[in-house]
Image (cartoon, helix red, strand yellow):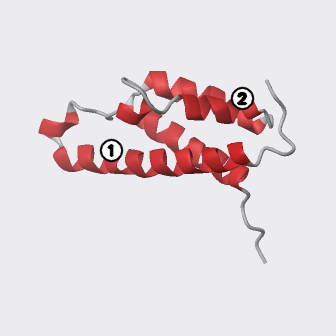
Amino acid sequence: MAQALTPMDALAGRLAELIALLETAGEHYWRRWMTRALARIDDHQLAGVSGVLAAYGGEDTFSDLELSPELAGQEPHRHQARNARLAELRTEIFELANTVATGTAGWQDG
């Protein structure tokens, strides 16, 4: 019987998927941001989860990101699919990060 993923494991997995998507789209700023957060999460540091949550909210944040806007006119289906997947991952990651942040036993600050 397979063991269920913890929210921390699920968060790390979704971040890895997001990082791959960002790399494919050529989005370097947010890829670096999420790569740093994932490294801290892999080291069991709460700062990684805080880093993920800090990317959301406000103007010009991860919440506002549109991938490959140049594709909108040239390849609209590809543009739509890429951004739909981004929206799914963005929502899942936010929810998982909040879940982890509210149940932080065993995490280190820093």
Residue occupied by mark 1:
83
Judging from the image, what secondary structure is the residue with disc 2 in?
helix
Q: Which callout, 1 or 2, points at the residue further toward the start of the chain? A: 2
Q: Quadrant of the N terminus?
A: bottom right
Label count reads 2
Residue at 18%, 38% (x, y): give it: 72
Q: In front: 51, or 17?
A: 51
What is the x, y in percent for residue 105? 84, 46
Judging from the image, what secondary structure is the residue with disc 1 in?
helix
What is the x, y in percent for residue 54? 56, 28
Q: Which amino acid, mark 1?
A: Asn
Asked which quadrant contains residue 41, the reply is: top right
| Mark 1 neighbour density, 10 Å: few (under 14) some (14–19) many (20 or more) | some
Asked which quadrant contains residue 101, the reply is: top right
What is the x, y in percent for residue 16? 59, 42
Indicate left or right for 55 with 51 as reference: left
What is the x, y in percent for residue 64? 35, 32
- Viewer-nearest of labels 1 and 2? 2
Residue placed farthest to the right in the image? 106
Instruction: Specify the label residue 20 is tagged with.
Output: none
Residue placed farthest to the bottom in the image? 1
Residue at 39%, 47% (x, y): give it: 87
| Mark 2 neighbour density, 10 Å: few (under 14) some (14–19) many (20 or more) | many
What whole-number distance in Å separates the C-alpha atoms at marks 1 and 2? 27 Å
Q: Which amino acid, mark 2?
A: Ala
Residue occupied by mark 2:
47
Judge whether 83 appears above or below 65 on screen.
below
Residue at 62%, 44% (x, y): give it: 97
Indicate left or right for 108 with 84 as reference: right
Q: Quadrant of the C terminus?
A: top right
Judge whether 9 appears above or below 3 on screen.
above
